[in-house]
Amino acid sequence: LYSQALTARNQKNFGLAVSLLRRAVHGQPDRVEYHLALGETLGWMNRFDEAEAVYREALARFPRSTAAKTGLGQVLLWKASYGEARTTFASALEENPGSREAREGLATVAYWTGDYRTARKEFERIRAGDPSHAQASKVIAEIDHVTAPAFGIGTLYRRDDQPYRVIRSEAAIALFSDPGTKWTVSGGAFALENRDSGRDATVPFGELAVESKLGHGRLDIRARARYIQFPDDDSVVLPAVSLSRGFGNAGRVTLFFDESELLFSERSLESHPSVETLGLRWSREGSDGWTAAASARSLRYFDDNSGISTDAWALFPINTNERFRISAGPAVSWRDTDESRFRAVPGTSDGVYDPYWTPQELIEGRGVVTITWQARRIDLHFHGDAGFAQDEAIDLASGLAFSRTFHPWSVSMSGRTSIGPRLELTTQLKRESTVFYEANEIQASLAGRF
C-alpha cells in the first residue's frame, strides 16, 4: 500500500495516495513513515486541519520524531498559527540540532512574522552550512534591502469651502539600529491660510519615531515625539505610543495613545488645538481575502473638552484575479463630544466650530467600494464611500439642540510606481464631503533606499 501510494503521489494522483496511506496507517500504525507521508500529502492538498491531526497522532505515538515535529510545524505555518509553529520547530531543534528542515522552518516563521533579527541569524546559520542554499541567500538579501537606510519627501495640499487652505511639506530619513528596530527622523512645516480674513501662518514641526519588535516578533512597539510650534507661537511636544500583538487567526489587537495637532480648521489659526486619544483596535485579514477592523477611542482635547468615538468596517472580495481586485462592504461609526464648540460669527448669520469640530451624537453608516489594479509598473487604487448620517446641532437663533441628517461621501484615487530599482513615487487625489466641510486634497511623495 505504501509503495502504491508513493507511485500515486509521483503521478499527482493525491486523492488515491491519501486513500492508500490511510489504509497503510490503519494496518500498521507503528510505522512512522506512513504517518509522515499521509500528513505531507494532505498538506500538499491544502487539507491542513486533516494534516495537523495526522501529525499530532504521529507525535502521540512517536514523541521524539523530529520529522513529525517538523511536518506539524510546516502545517501550522501554512495555517498562520505562527506562535505554535515557532514552538514546534524550536522543539524539533532541541531534539535534533542538526535538522536543517527544522531550522529552515524556524527561520521562515521569523521572516513571515517580521522578526528579522531571528530570521537573519537562522538563515545565516543555514547558509554557513550550505553556501549554495538559494532560499537562505534570497531571504538574507531581502532583509538587507528592507532594512537599508531609507528616505522620503512628500507634500499635501488641501483646500475646503470654509475657506481654508493647508499645505504640508515633510522630509524624513529612516535608519535601522538592528534588523528589528527602525528609527525615523522627520521634519517639515504646515503653511496655513484663511483666504477670507487674509490671515496665514507657518507651523514648523519635527519628529523622532522608533519601531521595534519584541517577543520573537509577536509584539510591535511604536513610539514618537513630535515638536510643533502652533500658529499662536505655543510650542509643545506631542507624544504617541502603541503596542500591537497578533493572535493568529483571531486577528491583531492594538492599544494606542496619541496626542496630535488639530490644524484642519480655519479657527485653528488663532489657537493651539490638539487632542489626546486613548484607544483599542482589533483587525483581521481572512484567508479568503476579506478584511475587517473595529476600534474605540477616548478623546481629550487641549481645552479640557472630551469625547468618544467608535467605528467598525468590513470589506469582502467581489471580483479578484491576478491583476484586478474589487472589494465592498459596510462601515459604521458613532462619535460624541461633551461640549459643542459651534458658535455664531458676530455680525453674520453663519456659525463656525471654534477651534475644532465637535460632533455630537453623530452616527454614520456607509457603503464602501475599493478597486485595485496592478499593471506592469504601476499600482492604482480607487476608494469610494457614501451613506447616511445623523447628528445633533445647535440652532444659532435659539441656542437649542436639534437633530439633522446629511449624506457624507468621499472618493480617492491613488497610484504608485517604481522609478528605477530604489525609488518609488506615490500620488493621491481625494474629495470628501461632510456636514462640516467639502474639501479637495492632493498628495505626492517620493521614497527610496540608499
Image (cartoon, grey):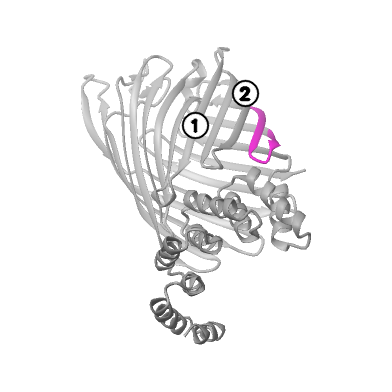
* Image position of 391 (left or right of 10): left
Q: Where's residue 223, x and y in %?
A: 56, 28
Mark yes or no: residue 261 visible: no
- Provide the major secondary structure of the magenta segment: strand
Name the spot of residue 165 as percent of width and height, x first: 54, 31
Residue to which mark 2 is pinned: 205
Residue 190, quarter of picture: top right
Name the N-terminal-most of marks 2 and 1: 2
> What element does badge 2 sit on?
strand
Where is residue 177 shown, x and y percent of the image? 70, 34
| Amino acid marked by disc 1 | Ser
Quadrant location, the C terminus: top right
Q: CA distance from mark 2 to mark 1?
A: 21 Å
Towards the viewer: 320 or 95: 95
- Asked if residue 450 is positioned above or below residue 89 in the image, the reply reads above
Task: Answer left or right for 77 relative to 295.
Answer: right
Residue closer to the observer: 158 or 170: 170
Q: Measured along the vertical axis of the image, is residue 247 above or below residue 361?
A: below
Magenta highlight on residue 428: no
Write down the residue under mark 1: 242
Q: Position of residue 44 (x, y in %)?
A: 51, 72
The quadrant in which residue 255 appears is: top left
Secondary structure category for the residue under label 1: strand
Amino acid type, mark 2: Phe
Q: Residue at x 63, y 43 (%)?
A: 444
User: At x 44% / y 42%, what residue is drawn?
Assistant: 432
Q: Classify mark 1: residues with Cα within 10 Å, few (<14), some (14-19) or many (20+).
A: some
In the rendered image, residue 174 lying in the magenta stretch gets the answer yes
- Kindly report which numbered mark, 2 or 1, lies closer to the viewer in this rendering: 1
Q: How many marks?
A: 2
- Magenta stretch: give its range: 172-189
| Along the line of sight, the residue nearer the viewer: 217 or 391 | 217
